[in-house]
Image (cartoon, rainbow, N blue to C red):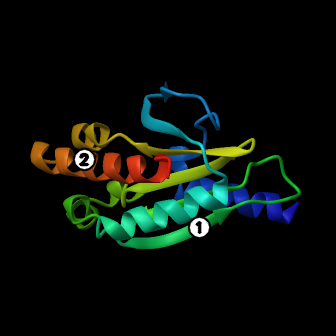
Amino acid sequence: MANKVYILIIILLTAGIFAYIGWGESGSRQGIELQITPSPYTIQQSLERAKNALEAQNIPVTAEIAIADTASNLPKAYLLLLNLPEAGELISQNIETAGMLPIKIILWEDGPQSKLAFVKPELLAKHYNLEPQKTETIQLKLNKVTEDIIKQD
């Protein structure tokens, strides 16, 4: 029981924005705009591909959090906290942005394959007055990472 509570706390505190995305549904839920992309790869393969794609784009991973509990019904998942300078300055400007920033990518098991998602940068721009140029740069970087993760070799 303690493990389930611990996992729930991790999800709610470090990935609250992703706490209820439906584990596979597309679109928005409760006003949270997510870009959800299926990956043809297993969760482990997608995670490695994500780390390689982020490194290729010079996007440091600040933290990697494994969200999995064999005793629960949660799918195996990983949360990657990214260090994008375009968004980083907002953290120091307003404590309320800490839940949305840093930018996060979550990858989760979906049967034999996996999915990945991130909050659409225009949502961040809308709520935290991010400059349009920075929003576009973040979107382009995340799109490139997504493409690199799911492309067939």
Q: Which secondary structure, mark 1?
A: strand
Who's the residue at 23% across and 37% down the image? 126
Q: Residues within 10 Å of mark 2 (few under 14, many from 20)?
A: few
- Which residue corresponds to mark 2? 140
Q: Nearer the viewer, residue 50 or 107?
A: 50
70 with respect to 6 (left or right): right
Q: Residues within 10 Å of mark 1 (few under 14, many from 20)?
A: some
Q: How many numbered circles are shown?
A: 2
Tell me the number on the disc at residue 109. Answer: none
Residue 35 makes an appearance in the image = yes
User: In the rendering, at what x and y percent does residue 89 appear?
Assistant: 20, 65
- Which residue corresponds to mark 1? 65
Who's the residue at 75% across and 41% down the image? 111
130 with respect to 6 (left or right): left
Q: Are marks 1 and 2 in contact (CB under 8 Å)?
A: no
| Mark 1 → mark 2, Cα distance in angstroms | 24 Å
Q: Looking at numbered disc 1 in the image, what kind of residue is underneath it? A: Ile
User: In the rendering, at what x and y percent does residue 143 appear?
Assistant: 33, 45
Which numbered disc flags the more N-terminal residue, 1 or 2? Answer: 1
Who's the residue at 37% across and 70% down the image? 55
Q: Which secondary structure, mark 2?
A: helix
Q: Nearer the viewer, residue 1 or 56?
A: 56
User: In the rendering, at what x and y percent does residue 149 appear?
Assistant: 47, 53
Q: Is residue 39 above or below residue 62?
A: above
Q: Looking at numbered disc 2 in the image, what kind of residue is underneath it? A: Leu
User: In the rendering, at what x and y percent does residue 142 appear?
Assistant: 33, 50
32 with respect to 108 (left or right): left
Quadrant in the picture for the N terminus: bottom right
